[in-house]
Image (cartoon, rainbow, N blue to C red):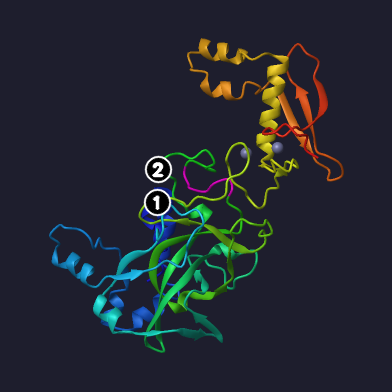
Amino acid sequence: MAPKHGLNSLQPPEDTHKRAKTSSNPASRSATPAEQIGAMAMVPFVVHYPNISTKKKLSKKDQDLVDNAEFQVSPFVAKGRAKEGELDQHYTVTPSAEWNAMKKYNNFIIQGDTYKNNHFVYVRSDETPKEVDEDNVKGFWVARILQVRAQNAQHVYALVAWMYWADELPPPRVRAPDQVSALGGKRTYHGKHELIASNYMEVLDVLSFAGKAEVLEWREEDDNIQSKLYWRQTFCRETQELSKIREHCICNGHFNPEVSMFICDNPSCKIWLHEACLINDILKKTYTKLVGTEPEINGIAKANGKTGKLSKSKPFDGKFSAKIKDQGAGPPTILIKDLRSGQKSREWEESIPCPKCDTILH
Ligand SMILES: [Zn+2]
Ligand SMILES: [Zn+2]
Protein backbone atom coordinates (compact mmCIF):
# COMPACT_ATOMS: atom_id res chain seq x y z
CA MET A 1 0.00 0.00 0.00
CA ALA A 2 1.65 3.18 -1.14
CA PRO A 3 1.11 6.36 0.84
CA LYS A 4 -2.00 8.19 -0.23
CA HIS A 5 -0.88 11.64 0.72
CA GLY A 6 -4.33 12.76 1.84
CA LEU A 7 -5.33 15.32 -0.75
CA ASN A 8 -6.01 12.65 -3.38
CA SER A 9 -9.73 13.06 -3.37
CA LEU A 10 -9.31 16.78 -3.87
CA GLN A 11 -7.03 16.60 -6.86
CA PRO A 12 -8.54 17.73 -10.15
CA PRO A 13 -9.50 14.78 -12.41
CA GLU A 14 -6.42 15.07 -14.62
CA ASP A 15 -4.28 14.17 -11.64
CA THR A 16 -6.15 10.98 -10.82
CA HIS A 17 -4.18 8.92 -13.26
CA LYS A 18 -0.91 9.83 -11.66
CA ARG A 19 -2.18 9.07 -8.16
CA ALA A 20 -3.79 5.81 -9.22
CA LYS A 21 -0.48 4.74 -10.56
CA THR A 22 1.06 5.58 -7.24
CA SER A 23 -1.18 3.35 -5.23
CA SER A 24 -0.54 0.33 -7.41
CA ASN A 25 3.15 1.00 -7.77
CA PRO A 26 4.91 -2.17 -6.61
CA ALA A 27 8.16 -0.28 -6.38
CA SER A 28 6.84 1.57 -3.38
CA ARG A 29 8.71 0.08 -0.50
CA SER A 30 5.85 0.64 1.85
CA ALA A 31 4.00 -2.13 0.02
CA THR A 32 6.52 -4.82 0.80
CA PRO A 33 6.16 -5.48 4.51
CA ALA A 34 2.38 -5.16 4.49
CA GLU A 35 2.18 -7.98 1.99
CA GLN A 36 4.23 -10.23 4.21
CA ILE A 37 2.11 -10.14 7.30
CA GLY A 38 -0.72 -12.31 6.15
CA ALA A 39 -4.32 -11.46 6.85
CA MET A 40 -3.53 -8.10 8.32
CA ALA A 41 -1.59 -7.16 5.24
CA MET A 42 -4.78 -7.23 3.21
CA VAL A 43 -6.10 -4.45 5.39
CA PRO A 44 -3.71 -1.50 5.47
CA PHE A 45 -4.10 1.01 8.25
CA VAL A 46 -6.48 3.80 7.36
CA VAL A 47 -7.00 7.07 9.22
CA HIS A 48 -10.60 8.26 9.68
CA TYR A 49 -11.88 11.51 11.14
CA PRO A 50 -15.13 10.66 12.90
CA ASN A 51 -17.48 13.39 14.03
CA ILE A 52 -17.50 12.56 17.72
CA SER A 53 -19.99 15.22 18.76
CA THR A 54 -22.77 14.15 16.42
CA LYS A 55 -26.17 13.52 18.03
CA LYS A 56 -27.27 11.29 15.18
CA LYS A 57 -27.74 7.56 15.69
CA LEU A 58 -24.65 5.96 14.18
CA SER A 59 -24.18 2.70 12.37
CA LYS A 60 -22.16 0.08 14.21
CA LYS A 61 -19.16 0.89 12.00
CA ASP A 62 -19.34 4.63 12.65
CA GLN A 63 -19.94 4.07 16.36
CA ASP A 64 -16.78 1.94 16.44
CA LEU A 65 -14.85 4.78 14.86
CA VAL A 66 -16.15 7.17 17.50
CA ASP A 67 -15.42 4.74 20.34
CA ASN A 68 -11.84 4.23 19.19
CA ALA A 69 -11.14 7.88 18.41
CA GLU A 70 -8.09 9.61 19.80
CA PHE A 71 -7.27 13.28 19.89
CA GLN A 72 -4.29 14.67 18.01
CA VAL A 73 -2.87 18.05 18.91
CA SER A 74 -1.25 19.34 15.74
CA PRO A 75 2.45 20.19 15.99
CA PHE A 76 1.77 23.02 13.54
CA VAL A 77 0.57 26.27 15.05
CA ALA A 78 0.52 28.85 12.29
CA LYS A 79 0.97 32.51 13.11
CA GLY A 80 -2.12 33.43 11.09
CA ARG A 81 -4.39 30.60 12.22
CA ALA A 82 -8.11 31.21 12.02
CA LYS A 83 -8.59 30.00 15.59
CA GLU A 84 -6.71 28.34 18.43
CA GLY A 85 -6.28 24.59 17.92
CA GLU A 86 -7.54 24.87 14.36
CA LEU A 87 -5.65 21.77 13.21
CA ASP A 88 -6.32 19.64 16.32
CA GLN A 89 -8.73 16.81 15.66
CA HIS A 90 -10.15 13.43 16.56
CA TYR A 91 -9.02 10.53 14.45
CA THR A 92 -9.34 6.76 14.41
CA VAL A 93 -6.97 4.29 12.83
CA THR A 94 -8.53 1.10 11.46
CA PRO A 95 -8.34 -1.81 11.87
CA SER A 96 -8.47 -0.48 15.42
CA ALA A 97 -7.75 -3.75 17.21
CA GLU A 98 -4.51 -4.30 15.29
CA TRP A 99 -3.48 -0.66 15.64
CA ASN A 100 -4.19 -0.54 19.37
CA ALA A 101 -2.42 -3.86 19.94
CA MET A 102 0.87 -2.44 18.70
CA LYS A 103 3.27 -0.94 21.17
CA LYS A 104 4.21 2.75 20.94
CA TYR A 105 7.87 3.61 20.54
CA ASN A 106 9.75 6.85 20.96
CA ASN A 107 12.06 6.25 18.05
CA PHE A 108 13.27 3.83 15.42
CA ILE A 109 16.39 3.46 13.35
CA ILE A 110 16.66 2.97 9.58
CA GLN A 111 20.09 2.61 8.06
CA GLY A 112 21.75 4.20 11.04
CA ASP A 113 19.39 7.21 11.16
CA THR A 114 17.33 7.67 14.30
CA TYR A 115 13.81 8.97 13.69
CA LYS A 116 11.71 10.44 16.48
CA ASN A 117 8.31 12.00 16.94
CA ASN A 118 8.14 15.46 15.38
CA HIS A 119 10.95 14.75 12.92
CA PHE A 120 10.29 15.58 9.30
CA VAL A 121 10.86 12.82 6.77
CA TYR A 122 11.01 12.40 3.02
CA VAL A 123 8.51 9.81 1.82
CA ARG A 124 8.81 7.93 -1.44
CA SER A 125 6.11 8.58 -4.00
CA ASP A 126 5.72 7.40 -7.58
CA GLU A 127 8.79 7.78 -9.77
CA THR A 128 10.72 8.76 -6.73
CA PRO A 129 14.42 9.36 -7.31
CA LYS A 130 16.83 6.98 -5.61
CA GLU A 131 18.38 9.42 -3.19
CA VAL A 132 17.25 12.78 -1.94
CA ASP A 133 19.45 15.59 -3.14
CA GLU A 134 19.06 19.32 -3.52
CA ASP A 135 17.63 19.21 -7.05
CA ASN A 136 15.10 16.44 -6.68
CA VAL A 137 13.38 17.01 -3.33
CA LYS A 138 10.08 17.61 -5.08
CA GLY A 139 10.11 14.00 -6.25
CA PHE A 140 9.44 13.13 -2.62
CA TRP A 141 6.62 13.86 -0.25
CA VAL A 142 7.37 15.34 3.14
CA ALA A 143 5.66 14.38 6.38
CA ARG A 144 6.05 14.94 10.10
CA ILE A 145 6.06 11.97 12.46
CA LEU A 146 3.33 12.10 15.11
CA GLN A 147 3.52 8.62 16.58
CA VAL A 148 5.45 5.39 16.08
CA ARG A 149 4.05 1.90 16.64
CA ALA A 150 5.50 -1.52 15.92
CA GLN A 151 4.49 -5.14 15.84
CA ASN A 152 8.10 -6.23 15.78
CA ALA A 153 11.36 -5.00 14.33
CA GLN A 154 10.22 -5.72 10.78
CA HIS A 155 6.84 -4.03 11.04
CA VAL A 156 7.17 -0.47 12.17
CA TYR A 157 4.53 2.11 11.39
CA ALA A 158 4.41 5.86 11.80
CA LEU A 159 1.35 8.04 12.06
CA VAL A 160 2.29 11.19 10.16
CA ALA A 161 0.88 14.57 9.24
CA TRP A 162 1.44 15.48 5.62
CA MET A 163 3.23 18.56 4.32
CA TYR A 164 2.27 19.66 0.80
CA TRP A 165 4.21 21.31 -1.98
CA ALA A 166 2.32 24.37 -3.19
CA ASP A 167 1.67 22.66 -6.56
CA GLU A 168 -0.37 20.01 -4.77
CA LEU A 169 -2.86 22.37 -3.14
CA PRO A 170 -6.44 22.14 -4.40
CA PRO A 171 -7.94 25.32 -5.86
CA PRO A 172 -9.78 27.44 -3.27
CA ARG A 173 -13.59 27.57 -3.34
CA VAL A 174 -13.45 31.25 -4.20
CA ARG A 175 -10.90 32.23 -6.80
CA ALA A 176 -7.99 34.06 -5.16
CA PRO A 177 -6.39 37.01 -6.96
CA ASP A 178 -2.90 35.59 -6.39
CA GLN A 179 -3.65 32.05 -7.61
CA VAL A 180 -1.01 30.94 -10.11
CA SER A 181 -3.59 29.02 -12.17
CA ALA A 182 -7.32 28.33 -11.93
CA LEU A 183 -6.63 24.58 -11.62
CA GLY A 184 -4.53 24.63 -8.48
CA GLY A 185 -4.19 26.30 -5.11
CA LYS A 186 -0.62 27.50 -5.58
CA ARG A 187 -0.25 31.24 -4.97
CA THR A 188 2.25 33.66 -6.44
CA TYR A 189 3.87 34.09 -3.02
CA HIS A 190 4.72 30.41 -2.62
CA GLY A 191 8.45 29.88 -2.97
CA LYS A 192 10.23 26.90 -4.54
CA HIS A 193 11.28 25.52 -1.15
CA GLU A 194 7.99 26.14 0.55
CA LEU A 195 5.86 23.43 2.12
CA ILE A 196 2.38 23.85 3.52
CA ALA A 197 1.72 22.03 6.79
CA SER A 198 -1.57 20.17 7.12
CA ASN A 199 -3.61 18.00 9.45
CA TYR A 200 -4.12 15.28 6.86
CA MET A 201 -2.81 12.19 8.60
CA GLU A 202 -1.76 8.79 7.38
CA VAL A 203 -0.17 5.63 8.74
CA LEU A 204 2.97 4.77 6.80
CA ASP A 205 5.27 1.82 6.90
CA VAL A 206 8.56 3.40 7.90
CA LEU A 207 10.27 1.63 5.02
CA SER A 208 8.67 4.22 2.74
CA PHE A 209 10.85 6.85 4.38
CA ALA A 210 13.75 8.11 2.28
CA GLY A 211 15.58 10.04 4.98
CA LYS A 212 15.14 12.86 7.39
CA ALA A 213 14.16 16.27 6.07
CA GLU A 214 15.15 19.57 7.54
CA VAL A 215 12.12 21.84 7.49
CA LEU A 216 12.18 25.19 9.26
CA GLU A 217 9.26 27.16 10.46
CA TRP A 218 9.48 30.63 8.95
CA ARG A 219 7.76 33.26 11.07
CA GLU A 220 8.34 35.90 8.36
CA GLU A 221 10.52 37.98 10.61
CA ASP A 222 13.55 37.82 8.34
CA ASP A 223 13.93 37.02 4.67
CA ASN A 224 16.91 34.68 4.66
CA ILE A 225 14.96 31.55 4.04
CA GLN A 226 15.43 30.92 0.34
CA SER A 227 17.60 27.83 0.16
CA LYS A 228 16.07 25.62 2.83
CA LEU A 229 12.76 23.85 3.07
CA TYR A 230 10.36 25.84 5.20
CA TRP A 231 6.70 26.19 6.12
CA ARG A 232 4.89 29.32 7.28
CA GLN A 233 1.32 28.39 6.43
CA THR A 234 -1.09 25.60 7.22
CA PHE A 235 -3.87 23.97 5.23
CA CYS A 236 -6.81 22.86 7.36
CA ARG A 237 -8.49 19.59 6.37
CA GLU A 238 -11.85 20.60 7.75
CA THR A 239 -12.13 24.13 6.36
CA GLN A 240 -9.92 23.60 3.28
CA GLU A 241 -8.44 27.01 4.06
CA LEU A 242 -4.86 28.22 4.16
CA SER A 243 -3.81 30.15 7.26
CA LYS A 244 -3.10 33.84 6.86
CA ILE A 245 0.42 35.10 6.36
CA ARG A 246 2.04 38.49 6.73
CA GLU A 247 0.65 41.22 4.48
CA HIS A 248 2.76 43.69 2.55
CA CYS A 249 2.42 46.34 -0.14
CA ILE A 250 -0.54 48.51 -1.16
CA CYS A 251 -2.19 45.35 -2.54
CA ASN A 252 -2.13 43.65 0.89
CA GLY A 253 -0.37 40.79 -0.86
CA HIS A 254 2.39 38.58 0.45
CA PHE A 255 6.10 38.02 0.16
CA ASN A 256 7.64 35.37 -2.04
CA PRO A 257 11.16 35.07 -0.60
CA GLU A 258 12.54 34.38 -4.08
CA VAL A 259 11.26 37.65 -5.54
CA SER A 260 12.82 40.83 -4.19
CA MET A 261 10.59 43.68 -3.15
CA PHE A 262 11.23 47.40 -2.78
CA ILE A 263 11.10 49.05 0.60
CA CYS A 264 10.05 52.62 1.35
CA ASP A 265 12.76 54.26 3.47
CA ASN A 266 10.45 56.74 5.15
CA PRO A 267 10.81 55.62 8.81
CA SER A 268 7.11 56.15 9.45
CA CYS A 269 6.13 54.10 6.37
CA LYS A 270 8.64 51.26 5.77
CA ILE A 271 6.21 49.45 3.49
CA TRP A 272 7.47 46.58 1.31
CA LEU A 273 6.28 46.90 -2.28
CA HIS A 274 5.92 44.46 -5.16
CA GLU A 275 7.62 45.53 -8.34
CA ALA A 276 4.43 44.96 -10.36
CA CYS A 277 2.41 47.08 -7.91
CA LEU A 278 4.91 49.96 -8.19
CA ILE A 279 4.75 49.81 -11.98
CA ASN A 280 0.94 49.75 -11.92
CA ASP A 281 0.80 52.73 -9.61
CA ILE A 282 3.14 54.80 -11.75
CA LEU A 283 1.42 53.88 -15.01
CA LYS A 284 -1.95 54.86 -13.52
CA LYS A 285 -0.54 58.23 -12.52
CA THR A 286 1.10 58.67 -15.92
CA TYR A 287 -2.18 57.90 -17.63
CA THR A 288 -4.09 60.38 -15.49
CA LYS A 289 -1.49 63.06 -16.14
CA LEU A 290 -1.21 62.62 -19.91
CA VAL A 291 -4.62 61.27 -20.94
CA GLY A 292 -6.98 62.40 -18.21
CA THR A 293 -9.02 60.83 -15.50
CA GLU A 294 -11.78 59.46 -17.75
CA PRO A 295 -10.24 56.34 -19.24
CA GLU A 296 -11.10 56.52 -22.94
CA ILE A 297 -10.82 52.74 -23.20
CA ASN A 298 -14.01 52.60 -21.17
CA GLY A 299 -15.95 54.09 -24.07
CA ILE A 300 -14.54 51.50 -26.44
CA ALA A 301 -15.35 48.69 -24.06
CA LYS A 302 -18.92 49.91 -23.73
CA ALA A 303 -19.25 50.12 -27.48
CA ASN A 304 -18.24 46.47 -27.59
CA GLY A 305 -21.04 45.61 -25.23
CA LYS A 306 -18.77 44.79 -22.31
CA THR A 307 -18.90 46.41 -18.92
CA GLY A 308 -15.43 47.82 -19.26
CA LYS A 309 -14.80 47.06 -15.62
CA LEU A 310 -11.67 45.04 -16.21
CA SER A 311 -10.21 47.54 -18.66
CA LYS A 312 -10.88 50.37 -16.27
CA SER A 313 -8.48 49.05 -13.63
CA LYS A 314 -5.65 49.17 -16.16
CA PRO A 315 -6.59 51.98 -18.53
CA PHE A 316 -2.92 52.38 -19.43
CA ASP A 317 -2.67 48.91 -21.02
CA GLY A 318 -1.40 49.25 -24.56
CA LYS A 319 -0.79 52.97 -24.06
CA PHE A 320 2.09 53.09 -21.65
CA SER A 321 4.56 50.50 -20.43
CA ALA A 322 7.31 50.71 -17.87
CA LYS A 323 10.11 48.83 -16.29
CA ILE A 324 12.09 49.45 -13.15
CA LYS A 325 15.84 49.98 -13.42
CA ASP A 326 17.50 48.87 -10.23
CA GLN A 327 21.23 48.43 -10.67
CA GLY A 328 21.99 48.37 -6.99
CA ALA A 329 24.03 51.59 -6.95
CA GLY A 330 21.87 54.66 -6.50
CA PRO A 331 18.11 54.86 -6.17
CA PRO A 332 15.88 52.74 -8.45
CA THR A 333 14.25 54.56 -11.34
CA ILE A 334 11.47 53.72 -13.73
CA LEU A 335 11.66 53.84 -17.51
CA ILE A 336 8.29 54.75 -18.98
CA LYS A 337 7.37 54.24 -22.64
CA ASP A 338 4.54 56.06 -24.42
CA LEU A 339 3.05 53.57 -26.88
CA ARG A 340 0.13 55.64 -28.16
CA SER A 341 -0.24 55.72 -31.89
CA GLY A 342 0.18 59.11 -33.45
CA GLN A 343 2.90 59.86 -30.92
CA LYS A 344 6.48 59.14 -31.68
CA SER A 345 7.43 56.31 -29.39
CA ARG A 346 8.78 58.30 -26.52
CA GLU A 347 10.49 57.13 -23.37
CA TRP A 348 11.73 58.82 -20.26
CA GLU A 349 13.02 58.01 -16.80
CA GLU A 350 11.49 59.03 -13.48
CA SER A 351 12.25 58.52 -9.84
CA ILE A 352 9.85 56.24 -7.98
CA PRO A 353 7.54 57.66 -5.31
CA CYS A 354 6.16 55.36 -2.62
CA PRO A 355 2.51 54.77 -3.56
CA LYS A 356 1.56 55.02 0.11
CA CYS A 357 3.46 58.05 1.43
CA ASP A 358 4.89 59.60 -1.74
CA THR A 359 8.50 59.54 -0.46
CA ILE A 360 10.96 58.89 -3.31
CA LEU A 361 12.46 55.41 -3.05
CA HIS A 362 16.22 55.44 -2.70
ZN1 LIG B 1 1.65 44.47 -4.16
ZN1 LIG C 1 6.21 55.03 1.97
Q: The residue under label 1 is which amino acid type?
A: Gln
Local packing at callout 1 (Cα closer than 10 Å; few below 14, some 14-19, many 20+) is some
Q: Is residue 254 above or below residue 140?
A: above
The quadrant the N terminus occupies is: bottom left
Rendered location of residue 299, percent (x, y): 56, 11
Q: Quadrant of ligand 2?
A: top right
- In the image, is 206 to the left or to the right of 131? left
Rendered location of residue 208, percent (x, y): 46, 75
Residue underneath mark 1? 240
Residue drawn at (51%, 74%) of the image = 119
- In the image, is 208 to the left or to the right of 360? left
Residue underneath mark 2? 173
In this view, the residue farthest toward the front is 268
Magenta range is 183-189
The quadrant the C terminus occupies is: top right
- The answer to if 253 sits in the magenta stretch is no
